Image (tube, rainbow, N blue to C red):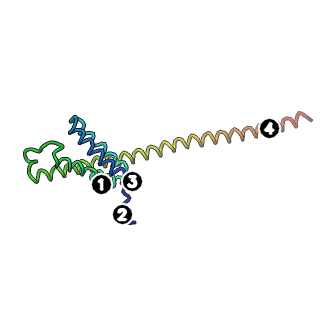
Amino acid sequence: MANLPNIQIKPLVFGAAIAAAFILFGWQFNDWLYPFSAIGLLYAGYGQENITMGTIMGAVASTPIIILFLDGYLGQPTGFFITENGIIAIAAIIIIVGALVGFVGAWTKRSREKAKEEYEKKQNIGKNKTKKKKQQKKADAQKTKEKTKYVDKIFKK
């Protein structure tokens, strides 16, 4: 089990379900809902730990789309795509597009994490400045107290 990659199952299952649901909604209601199935593939890639796993899980999450294509929910193929080679070509295209969309989701997650780290660094820099300013003010106040003590000693005599 230690050699198995760290696969996040929840984003994979939910991403595949979202992709399949939008295909079914597009078939049932309006054709313009078909492209929104990419949201599920993005989520499948976004939920993984690194870009490689995001790409692989995007391809895996696109398998329900292949099954729905074979059942005819994406319309009936015509011409070259009626043949066995055409059906295999469409299945390969769907898997490649799923891998590409999963890659984009994983890349987006990586970019977001980097941006969050940079933002936190900027926030920490500002906090350190205020701490340093407070320490500087305390040191200045201490110096002025010492000066006033010295001045008071001179004038008391």
Q: Which residue is nearer to you in this view: 62 or 138? A: 62
Q: What element carries label 4?
A: helix
Q: Marks 4/3: CA distance?
A: 60 Å
Residue 56 - label = 1
Q: CB under 8 Å between callouts 4 and 2?
A: no
Q: Dot 2 surroundings within 10 Å: few (below 14), some, or many (20 or more)?
A: few
Kindly identify which residue carries mark 4: 147
Which residue type does callout 1 highlight? Answer: Ile
Q: Dot 4 surroundings within 10 Å: few (below 14), some, or many (20 or more)?
A: few
Residue 8 left/right relative to 143: left
Tell me how many marks there are. 4
Q: Which residue is drawn at 30% across and 47% down?
A: 17
Q: Where is residue 104 in the image (x, y as percent from the top left)?
A: 32, 46
Q: Which residue is drawn at 32% across and 51% down?
A: 13
Kindly identify which residue carries mark 3: 49
Question: Could you say which quadrant of the image residue 146 lies in?
Answer: top right
Q: Dot 3 surroundings within 10 Å: few (below 14), some, or many (20 or more)?
A: some
Residue 68 left/right relative to 106: left
